[in-house]
């Protein structure tokens, strides 16, 4: 069971694809370019063959697509309703072919999310075929996902079958062709690597947070371990072993770097920001927030570092504040290293111009007041009440 | 003549107002001849309960597990349960005892009550609203689901009704009560009262002023004795009760300084508390009220200069620095006309407006053609899975401060990866929130047996909020036509959800 999805934009994009490609399919299904072969007209068609060419589609010609075109004789023994079924395999790394996925349901196999395009071609009689190249299939290139990124060798198949045939891919005649395409999007086989890479980067930031007070406490180490364990628990046994080895190595490196003060959070954050893994930056900041509160005390230096990392990762101040509200309610804001300033506690930038600061203070007040009303956990309630009082002090301070 | 009443069920005090023969709203004295009943409950024996001033005076003297005050703050919080003589009591049970006493006293002298309206803070949660209705029903009131009105709205009705001149313009109701603060902005044109927005602070009231005063007394104690002040425990050591603290606060409203006797092991010491010191101690609380006012003005897209007046409600507005802060902050001298009784008096007027068919001719003329339009008290939304981030998020369907009644719809999509059912949750929050961790999930269910789809299809979510505070929610799978509907009203709980485990307030004798 799932939550309902809110993807009006996605519906819009799908709508564009559907429209664009159905217009094209209409042109071929109408039998455009179809002629009769044989003695009657003195013209003899060659055997059926296909080719793939990259084209641009859409009103602005900005949507990449691969057009599958066919020509030649379509040998049938009787008049029948026919259709063309097109699918693809990536044969760059595996000559047996690896699946090509598609994110648009109308361009998917009926049971799998692999690419497949079916186009009706109308009624076909014996000795008929395409004299010239005619589009018999189309693939929305930007909606396809390949095993890996880079230059990919794609093999397209196109079969003609009777519309009533029990299997779409059991064709009366078919062809195959190759095309090389350049793919920027991370391939589905690269995701494991990318995820692991994002985790090691997050680990570096977590270690930086743990070391900001000069001491890698046992509670902080336990928090990092617990977080990482949770991140890899869904992997199969073999992948978990690989992940643990890699993360252990990364942990040793990061701790050494932190001790030598050579751990560069800026470079790490930039790499994370570029990661194609969904929520990688947010997840990394979440780890930092958990580490910050692990020993039960938030030091001003930790909160400053968290905000610095948040900035570097491009996380909004609201999201950052949400993370601290979620993960640090039980932590004290006063310790040996001093008291957390009201600004740091509630996330007010002290450099804001006065009017902007006043507006921001009202916004923060409204947020904590609402959270206090809905929260039932006494520990969180106490934190939100403290934040409201901090906001009131800031209001007095900023006028 | 019908008995039409309004009740201000407050954190510190409870007041009952009734409609006179001439259609005037009048405070009805309690059985002890007092205008207000302290919202305090003392279990003197296993089945004997004392309600009101006597109970309040015993706070800090009687056993902690036998005396209860300020329980309104915990209304709607299911986790708050008090064990009294082996029985579980929830905040709404204590409220029921207060309501029962004032009902029995009124009905003993006037006959059965025909219509009642009870007031609640503007930002009371849905559960707290339901609990208030249930408490009234437990107390023997015969009332419908439309028996509640927000406290500042009631105060506005009172001020509009009692104004010597016809009101016209935007007004602020500054309601600083015993436990909560509400800033409400109204658009008033004679008999037409339209609420534009309400901004409440749940934990800001007289109780908090008292806590600051206790802190101040503690500082004096430490200065005089060199010993650390340990809060409530030391309060009893120095033989100072909450009642005493309230009296000191009241005294500071009329005098510049108070000499407080602190009875210690070394004899009685005297601590002098000045009004300036008290004002400084409570200044961050007053700032919170200012912030709430500013936020209300922001929400109504108004500035202080747009206000035609400020009306005070709630006993805490009697603290001089509170009224002074308003004048300093908004540049408007506030009008204070019976701030303690205004909410109950307005609630009684509202009861009359809602029950015109029960009024006599004179009462009908006095009530006139008043109309009140309220607004939605919270943001109501639904959870959904954001396809791009993969996170569960909250989308607002009906925003706060929408004029009632209102209906809003939003469309979502159901995709190929979502199987044959979808989980639907209704959320509630005081500000616009997108993170489900910061909202109340007030209802959850599944829309089941949906056809599997090969492409995204529309799911339409529609909420309707009526003038009685009842919300109707419908979730429609457009492709199949299947829908799920729920009515979120203030019905009493079923028997399996009884308010308390084994507690029946009828078993208790009210002394």
Image (spheres, grey):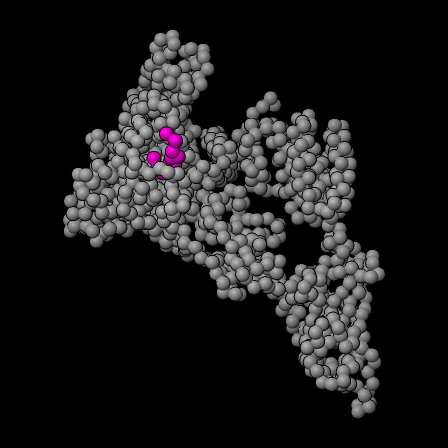
B273 vs B42, nearest the viewer: B42
- The image quarter in which residue B325 lies: top left
At x 25%, y 37%, the residue is: B102
Q: Where in the figure is residue A139, as x and y percent of width and height?
A: 71, 66
Magenta residue span = B85-94
Relative placement, left or right, of A101 versus B135 is: right
Relative placement, left or right, of B357 versus A102 is: left
Relative placement, left or right, of A216 versus A349 is: right
- The image quarter in which residue A2 lies: bottom right
At x 27%, y 44%, the residue is: B141
Q: Where in the figure is residue B310, as x and y percent of width and height?
A: 32, 39
- Residue B92 is covered by the magenta coloring: yes
- Residue A356 is covered by the magenta coloring: no
Relative placement, left or right, of A39 versus B99 is: right
On screen, B243 above or below A4?
above
Q: Where in the figure is residue A17, as x and y percent of width and height?
A: 64, 65
Query: Which part of the image, by quadrant, shows the N terminus of chain A?
Result: bottom right
């Amino acid at each position: 069971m799932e939550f309902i999805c809110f993807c009006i934009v996605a519906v819009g994009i799908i709508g564009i694809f559907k429209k664009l490609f159905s217009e094209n399919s209409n042109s071929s299904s109408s039998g455009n370019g179809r002629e009769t072969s044989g003695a009657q007209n003195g013209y003899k068609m060659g055997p059926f063959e296909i080719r793939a060419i990259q084209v641009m589609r859409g009103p602005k010609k900005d949507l990449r697509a691969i057009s599958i075109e066919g020509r030649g004789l379509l040998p049938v023994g009787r008049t029948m309703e026919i259709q063309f079924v097109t699918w693809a395999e990536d044969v760059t790394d595996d000559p047996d072919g690896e699946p090509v996925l598609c994110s648009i349901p109308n361009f998917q196999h009926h049971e799998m999310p692999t690419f497949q395009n079916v186009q009706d071609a109308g009624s076909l009689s014996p000795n008929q075929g395409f004299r010239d190249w005619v589009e018999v299939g189309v693939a929305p290139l930007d909606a396809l996902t390949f095993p890996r990124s880079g230059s990919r060798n794609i093999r397209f198949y196109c079969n003609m079958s009777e519309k009533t045939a029990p299997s779409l891919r059991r064709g009366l005649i078919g062809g195959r062709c190759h095309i090389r395409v350049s793919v920027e999007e991370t391939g589905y086989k690269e995701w494991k690597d990318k995820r692991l890479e994002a985790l090691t980067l997050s680990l570096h930031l977590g270690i930086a947070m743990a070391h900001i007070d000069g001491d890698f406490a046992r509670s902080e180490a336990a928090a990092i371990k617990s977080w990482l364990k949770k991140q890899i628990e869904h992997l199969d046994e073999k992948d978990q072993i690989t992940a643990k080895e890699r993360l252990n190595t990364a942990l040793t490196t990061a701790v050494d770097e932190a001790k030598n003060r050579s751990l560069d959070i800026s470079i790490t954050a930039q790499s994370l920001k570029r990661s194609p893994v969904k929520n990688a930056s947010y997840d990394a900041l979440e780890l930092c927030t958990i580490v910050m509160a692990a020993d039960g005390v938030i030091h001003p230096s930790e909160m400053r570092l968290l905000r610095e990392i948040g900035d570097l990762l491009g996380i909004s101040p609201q999201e950052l504040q949400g993370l601290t509200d979620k993960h640090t309610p039980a932590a004290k804001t006063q310790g040996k290293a001093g008291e957390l300033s009201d600004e740091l506690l509630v996330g007010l930038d002290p450099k804001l111009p006065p009017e902007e600061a006043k507006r921001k203070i009202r916004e923060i007040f409204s947020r904590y007041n609402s959270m206090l009303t809905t929260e039932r956990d006494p520990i969180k309630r106490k934190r939100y009440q403290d934040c409201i009082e901090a906001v009131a002090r800031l209001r007095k301070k900023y006028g | 003549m019908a008995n039409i009443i309004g009740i201000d069920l407050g954190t510190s005090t409870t007041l009952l107002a009734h409609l006179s023969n001439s259609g005037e709203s009048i405070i009805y004295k309690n059985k002890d001849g007092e205008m207000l009943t302290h919202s305090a409950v003392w279990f003197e024996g296993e089945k004997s309960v004392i309600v009101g001033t006597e109970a309040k005076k015993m706070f800090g003297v009687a056993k902690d597990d036998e005396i209860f005050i300020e329980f309104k703050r915990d209304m709607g919080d299911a986790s708050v349960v008090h064990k009294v003589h082996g029985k579980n009591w929830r905040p709404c049970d204590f409220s029921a005892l207060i309501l029962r006493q004032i009902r029995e006293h009124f009905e003993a002298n006037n006959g059965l009550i025909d219509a009642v309206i009870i007031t609640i803070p503007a930002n009371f949660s849905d559960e707290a609203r339901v609990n208030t209705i249930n408490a009234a029903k437990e107390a023997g009131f015969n009332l419908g689901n439309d028996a509640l009105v927000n406290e500042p709205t009631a105060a506005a009705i009172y001020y509009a009704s009692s104004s010597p001149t016809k009101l016209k313009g935007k007004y602020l109701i500054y309601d600083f009560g015993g436990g909560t603060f509400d800033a409400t902005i109204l658009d008033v044109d004679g008999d037409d009262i339209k609420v534009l927005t309400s901004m409440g602070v749940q934990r800001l009231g007289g109780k908090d002023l008292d806590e600051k005063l206790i802190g101040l007394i503690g500082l004096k104690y430490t200065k005089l004795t060199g010993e650390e002040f340990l809060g409530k425990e030391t309060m009893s050591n120095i033989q100072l009760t909450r009642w005493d603290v309230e009296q000191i606060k009241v005294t500071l409203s009329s005098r510049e300084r108070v000499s407080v006797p602190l009875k210690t092991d070394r004899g009685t010491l005297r601590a002098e508390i000045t009004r300036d010191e008290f004002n400084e101690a409570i200044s961050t609380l007053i700032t919170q009220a200012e912030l709430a006012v500013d936020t209300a003005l922001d929400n109504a897209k108004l500035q202080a200069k747009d206000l035609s007046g400020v009306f005070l409600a709630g006993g805490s507005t009697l603290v001089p620095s509170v009224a002074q802060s308003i004048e300093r902050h908004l540049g408007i001298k506030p009008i204070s006309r019976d701030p303690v009784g205004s909410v109950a008096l307005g609630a009684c007027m509202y009861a009359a407006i809602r029950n015109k068919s029960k009024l006599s001719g004179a009462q009908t003329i006095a009530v006139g053609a008043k109309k009140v339009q309220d607004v939605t008290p919270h943001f109501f939304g639904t959870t959904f899975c954001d396809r791009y981030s993969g996170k569960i998020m909250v989308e607002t369907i009906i925003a706060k401060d929408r004029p009632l009644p209102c209906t809003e719809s939003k469309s979502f999509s159901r995709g190929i990866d979502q199987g044959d059912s979808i989980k639907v949750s209704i959320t509630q929050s005081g500000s616009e929130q997108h993170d489900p961790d910061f909202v109340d999930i007030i209802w959850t269910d599944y829309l089941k047996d949906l056809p599997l789809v090969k492409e995204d299809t529309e799911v339409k979510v529609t909420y309707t909020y009526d003038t009685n505070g009842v919300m109707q929610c419908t979730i429609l799978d457009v492709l199949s036509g299947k829908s799920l509907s729920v009515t979120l009203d203030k019905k009493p709980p079923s028997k399996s959800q009884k308010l308390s485990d084994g507690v029946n307030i009828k078993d208790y004798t009210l002394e």
